[in-house]
Amino acid sequence: MTDPRKIVLVGMPGSGKSTLGRTLAEKLNCPFFDLDELIEKKEGTPIAAIFPEKGEGYFRNLESLVLEETLDQKQAFVLATGGGAPCYNDNMSLINAKAISVYLDVPLNHILDRLNQTQIEVRPLFSGLDTSEIILKLKNMYVDRHSFYEKAKIKLRGEDISPELLIAEWMPYLK
Ligand code: S3P
């Protein structure tokens, strides 16, 4: 059965899931978790090292495992997932069965700005690529992944999705 206080943010890398999630959790007075950070803690290795050392398949299995463990917690929380998490191993169905999912559908140009501001090197899927290759990769990822993200219960579109707006419009679903 769904616990309405478990909120899971999904969307492309650089869509602002962690930034929004942190503020949302503060406002809802519950813990915030970042799936990538939980994976790094469990593995004792940065994500950027897991990909080249153990491969993407290993990372995806670990990601699904940590996602499931987190969703099974009894407490309320806000969880920001990695961009790929909902798209592997039936994870989106699992998320929807156990939590309120929120899709941050952010325009590609805004994602690019955000990715330029933060470091590309912590995102192994973009390592070694130049800007035009990153743009192409992001476009392809969006095409591949949108149908998974679209299964989210709440879909928010725009450049700056504020926690205030999310709370104001969707509060009945979030508490
Ligand atoms: C990934 C996104 C990353 C991280 C990993 C893979 C992806 O998280 O989980 O590098 O497949 O899109 P962010 O969405 O926080 O960048």
Image: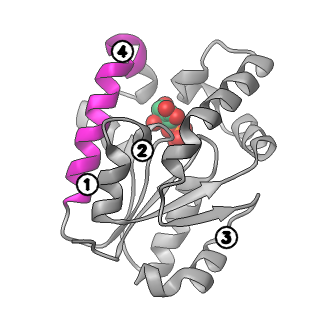
**Counting residues from the N terminus, which is met first, the one under dot 2 or under dot 3?**
2
**Counting residues from the N terminus, which is met first, the one under dot 2 or under dot 4?**
4
How many angstroms separate mark 1 from mark 2 (CA)?
A: 14 Å
In the image, is the residue at mark 4 within 8 Å of ligand 1 by its beta carbon? no
How many angstroms separate mark 2 from mark 3 (CA)?
A: 22 Å
Is residue 86 visible in the rendered structure shown here? yes
- The answer to the question of whether label 2 and label 3 lie on touching residues, with beta carbons closer than 8 A, is no
Residue 61 drawn at (x, y percent): 27, 30
Q: Is residue 122 left or right of residue 14?
A: left
> For the residue marked with disc 1, what is the amino acid?
Thr
In the rendered structure, find residue 70 and report the number of the disc placed on it. Answer: 1
**Counting residues from the N terminus, which is met first, the one under dot 1 or under dot 4?**
4
**Which residue does the numbered mark 4 point to in the structure image?**
55
Residue 90 drawn at (x, y percent): 32, 42
Residue 5 drawn at (x, y percent): 34, 76
Residue shown at 34% from the left, 65% from the top: 99
- Most foreground residue, 59 or 23: 59
**Which residue does the numbered mark 3 point to in the structure image?**
162
- The answer to the question of whether label 3 and label 1 lie on touching residues, with beta carbons closer than 8 A, is no
**Counting residues from the N terminus, which is met first, the one under dot 1 or under dot 2?**
1
> For the residue marked with disc 3, what is the amino acid?
Ser
Q: In the rendered image, which quarter contains the N terminus?
A: bottom left
Question: Which contiguous range is marked in magenta?
Answer: 50-72
> For the residue marked with disc 2, what is the amino acid?
Pro
In the rendered structure, find residue 34 and report the number of the disc placed on it. Answer: none
Residue shown at 80% from the left, 19% from the top: 132
How many angstroms separate mark 3 from mark 1 (CA)?
A: 25 Å
